Image (cartoon, rainbow, N blue to C red):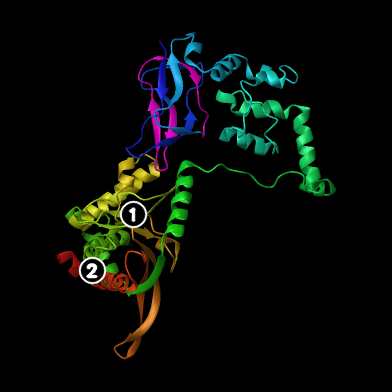
Amino acid sequence: MATCVVMPKAGVSVETCIMGEWVKKPGDKIAKNDVVFTYETDKSVFEYRAEEDGVLLHVLVSEGDDVPVMEPVCYIGKEGEDISALLSPAAREAVSEEAVPEAQALEIGAVPLQEVSAAPNPGRIRISPRARAAAGRMDIRDWSGIAGSGPNGRIIERDVRAYAQTGAAAEDRAADVSAEGGADLACPERAEKDYTDRALSGIRRAIARNMHASLSGMAQLTHSVSFDATEMIRCREKLKASSELLGLPKVSLNDMLLFAVSRILPKYPDLNAHFLDDRIRCFAHVHLGMAVDTPRGLMVPTIFDADRKSLAQISREAKSLAQECQSGAVDPGKLAGASFTVTNLGMFGVESFTPVINPPQTGILGVCSVVDRVRNLDGGVGVYPAMGLSLTYDHRALDGAPASRFLQELCRGLENFSAMLAV
């Protein structure tokens, strides 16, 4: 009997996943442990591997669809197995159409469009992300005339391509040009689009949602300071020179900042906390989030109990977490639970910026670039390397004075980094 494959649950808090790529297509043979499809959360990308041999009989969702966990996504069974009894009426229509070669189905006049539709589109038009993108490329803006052949009358990509072959599509495009005042007709060189629409990825949507909620739901304020990074840079050079002899990792300035924050933050419990509307949850230990730039977007893995770890341990863990994020293989559990976050834009030459808090945290520290500055030294003028720090905090949770004291003490610690290592 055919096996119904459901969208896996990728983490305790994950409710929906984005369907990624269908590595196997309907009709393909599948061996146990073959990758059938990929799926993604707002944190990472995963692969679903077949649990047994078989054939991919039918897929229920399209690439890019937002699918609730534990919802059916496909059927795997024996070649030629009849699964019509397991499907909804709309899905049965889609199965029968999949048996028709695509080139034949799209031949002009081969099939009346009304016969392709599995069900009418009641109320809201249901269209898959791939179909929406295809419609955009073909300059089809009105979807109401497209008959959907997907499950429950959903418009899928082949429906758009079929519609594009009809006279109705040409009329729609002409109507769009007329509505725009015929400007494109007057200027033929502008008739072709000079833009592309790209659907937001799961992680981009999550970032957009979280950052909007952060700025609209908090009373955020940013303080910016700088400190003399001479001692910090000198200490790093010593560690770098001794790394092979002492078996140390290659410690970066960012690792040193993470270490310093983990030592100073416990003295300011309202910054090492979550704001939960009617209460503040202060953590006994520092669970330090570190912002990582990845090809898929910003990720913030957590170094748990950072205040209990040495500089070498923090350095190793930070590098490991960054690599996991960039490869897309990070465990979702490592992307949650931070009590405070550090984000570094110094490598881009940024001298000051306003980092946005990751709710429900109450603070985030932005690390800026090192710049040469001039000051009085023993009655003369000297140049020193200054590093900037930008602290954004939730004014609902704490006031400007304690936030400034945290920055002040952190700067003192970084200016005397060698002594901090001895504590």
| Residue found 81% across the figure and 49% down from its top | 181
Judge whether residue 370 can be spotted in this image. no
In the image: residue 193, left or right of residue 201: right
The residue wearing badge 1 is: 290
Judge whether residue 153 can be spotted in this image. yes
Vertical comparison of 63 with 207: above or below:
above
Q: Amino acid at mark 1?
A: Met
In the image: residue 185, left or right of residue 72: right
Magenta residues (range): 37-64
Answer whether labels 1 and 2 touch (C-beta < 8 Å): no
| Residue found 32% across the figure and 67% down from its top | 398
| Residue found 35% across the figure and 54% down from its top | 360
Q: Position of residue 401 (x, y in %)?
A: 31, 74
Dot in front, 1 or 2: 1
Disc 2, SS: helix
Residue 396 vs residue 20, the one in the foreground: 396
In the image: residue 187, left or right of residue 422: right
